[in-house]
Image: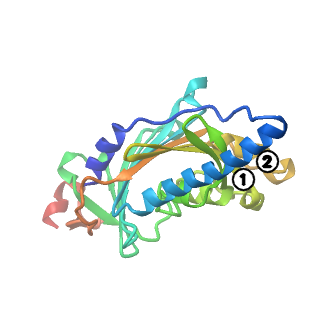
Amino acid sequence: MHRDARRAGGLATILVVALTACGPAGDGGERAEGAAAASDKEQLRGMVEQVDAMKLVEWHGQLLTANPDSGGKQIFELSGRFDPGSGSSTLAMDSMLDGEVQQVDYVVVDGRTYFNSDDWGASAAGCYVDITGDASRSWALPQDLDPRWSVSRARAVKPIGSGVSVDVPGSRLIDGLPRGLFQGVPAAVDKVKVRAIVKPHGPLVEVAVDVAGMWGHVPPEALAGFDTRRSGWWAMTMRESSDDAPIAEPKHVFDNKITAPSQCKRA
């Protein structure tokens, strides 16, 4: 189910562009800039309408150590499906955080969170444990499961190539990334505008966010003792899912404290 979303998301082309551009100058430049601003807002509005029209959102995201053009390496990868109507979600994660390889899957339905680990082996594929309220095993889930935050809460700034440079509230970025990534985020981040780029690419909406650059806008004293190393560059694509099957509660739900994963389908 959500493994299919990962494979489909992995085929998506990730947009990577520099967060710089030269603007026009002089009176003519000011008029052109004003016209461009209106065009930017219209283009951004078009992308908001595009993602709002998606019945099921299929998305794929990567957190990298830096812009790949600068040699950034992958920290983790997420792929998922999100149902805007019900708020249900599936999400798969491949992670190399702290040098530890992790592969886990989540299903969130009706406020319940279910978890599957690849460490359980192939015999436990499709078997889930209800971990609702278990912070230690739900750390990879974002606070906000709706991936459309990157366009719906963005403010157009200026054109960059065929895309739009936007500002995104720092609080929305933090909520859209795994909840265990940044522990004890300074309150000052709420007021920060994070630079990002959004671009339509056929059925895809592509997003690139300068996560590391966000910390430069937070007062140094607010960052004292806060670990910003798990930062870098967030690259994401969204498209309407080709699989219109509703997101449902897993068929096999077991208690791994009682039943071995190898026996989960008999529980």
- Select label 1 or label 2 by which is in front: 1
Lateral position of residue 184 relative to residue 51, left or right = right
| Three-letter amino acid code at the position of disc 1 | Lys
Lateral position of residue 259 relative to residue 198, left or right = left
| Three-letter amino acid code at the position of disc 2 | His
**Residue at (21% x, 53% y) in the render:** 124
Tag 1 near tag 2, CB within 8 Å? yes
Residue 256 image label: none
**Residue at (66% x, 45% y) in the render:** 36
- Secondary element at tag 2: helix
Residue nearest the observer in this picture, 241 or 246: 241
Task: State whether residue 20 is above or below residue 164.
Answer: above
Task: State whether residue 22 is above or below residue 117.
Answer: above
**Residue 179 in view here:** no
Residue 193 image label: 1
Q: Position of residue 34 (x, y in %)?
A: 73, 48
Residue 217 image label: 2
Q: Position of residue 24 (x, y in %)?
A: 76, 35
User: Going from the N terminus, do you reach mark 1 or mark 2 first?
Assistant: 1
